[in-house]
């Protein structure tokens, strides 16, 4: 009898920029393993040495997209990063996953809506005069309308994603 392999989950997020990025990735992967998933972390890839920065960036991009292609689902850290929005690289990876028909589970510190997150005047305009969307969603509608679920933390998100996948959950 052939053993079924664990669903592979790409671990998207700005954690790769942390000073303890490798340890953080190991933690997320161990969390996945505890719940019957196999975590795929960007630092699992081996980048060729002696490349130009541009060639290195191209290689990292290609390898991360390849990981997303082969995974079952994506777990995305959509906490705010360097401003009021999630990391742009993570948002891109979510878009790739959605385009490939892969379920995305997000996690981030709870916020009721973009209006609660972004300062605005009575007309709903931010300090630069741009409208702050008012759909009652905790993130930009293109993210919030594309995930299959969201949790406050990775520790809550991993078992929820595992349950979703075990129930045959898709996008």
Image: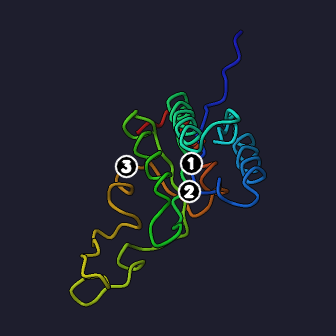
Task: Determine the residue positioned at 75% across, 43% down.
Answer: 34
Query: Eyeballing the image, is 94 above or below 154?
Result: above
Question: Could one spot residue 126 in this view of the protein?
Answer: yes
Give the colouring mode of the picture.
rainbow
On residue 132, which mark appears? none
Q: Does dot 3 land on a helix, a strand or a loop? A: loop
49 left or right of 72 in image: right
Q: Is residue 86 left or right of residue 6?
A: left
Residue 63 lies in quadrant: top right
Identify which residue, 136 or 55, lies in the foreground.
55
Q: Determine which residue is flagged by label 1.
A: 12
Q: Residue at 46% across / 56% down in the picture?
A: 88
What's the distance in space between the residues labelled 1 and 3, CA to CA? 15 Å
**Residue 104, how many percent across, how many down?**
48, 45
Q: Is residue 167 visible?
A: no
Name the disc covering residue 146, or none. Answer: 3
| Quadrant showing the C terminus | top left
Picture mark count: 3
Q: Position of residue 67 (x, y in %)?
A: 56, 33
On screen, residue 78 versus residue 44, left or right, reads left
Local secondary structure at mark 1: strand
Is 140 placed above or below 161 here?
Answer: below
Which residue is disc 2 drawn over?
77
Q: Quadrant of residue 165?
A: top right
Q: CA distance from mark 2 to mark 1?
A: 6 Å
* Distance from the alpha carbon under mark 2 to that under mark 3: 14 Å
Give neighbour class at mark 2: few <14, some 14-19, many 20+ (Cα, 10 Å): many
Whether pointer 2 and pointer 1 mark residues with C-beta atoms closer than 8 Å, the reply is yes
């Amino acid at each position: 009898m052939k053993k079924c392999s664990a669903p592979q989950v790409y671990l998207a997020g700005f954690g790769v920029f942390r000073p303890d990025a490798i340890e953080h990735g190991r933690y997320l992967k161990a969390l996945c393993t505890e719940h019957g998933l196999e975590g795929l972390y960007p630092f699992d890839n081996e980048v060729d040495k002696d490349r130009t920065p541009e060639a290195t960036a191209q290689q990292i991009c290609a390898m991360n997209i390849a990981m997303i292609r082969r995974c079952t689902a994506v777990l995305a850290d959509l906490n705010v990063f360097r401003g009021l929005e999630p990391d742009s690289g993570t948002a891109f990876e979510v878009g790739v996953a959605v385009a490939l028909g892969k379920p995305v589970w997000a996690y981030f510190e709870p916020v009721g809506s973009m209006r609660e997150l972004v300062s605005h005047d009575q007309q709903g305009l931010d300090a630069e005069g741009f409208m702050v969307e008012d759909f009652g969603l905790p993130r930009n509608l293109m993210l919030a309308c594309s995930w299959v679920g969201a949790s406050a933390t990775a520790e809550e998100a991993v078992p929820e994603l595992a349950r979703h996948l075990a129930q045959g959950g898709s996008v």
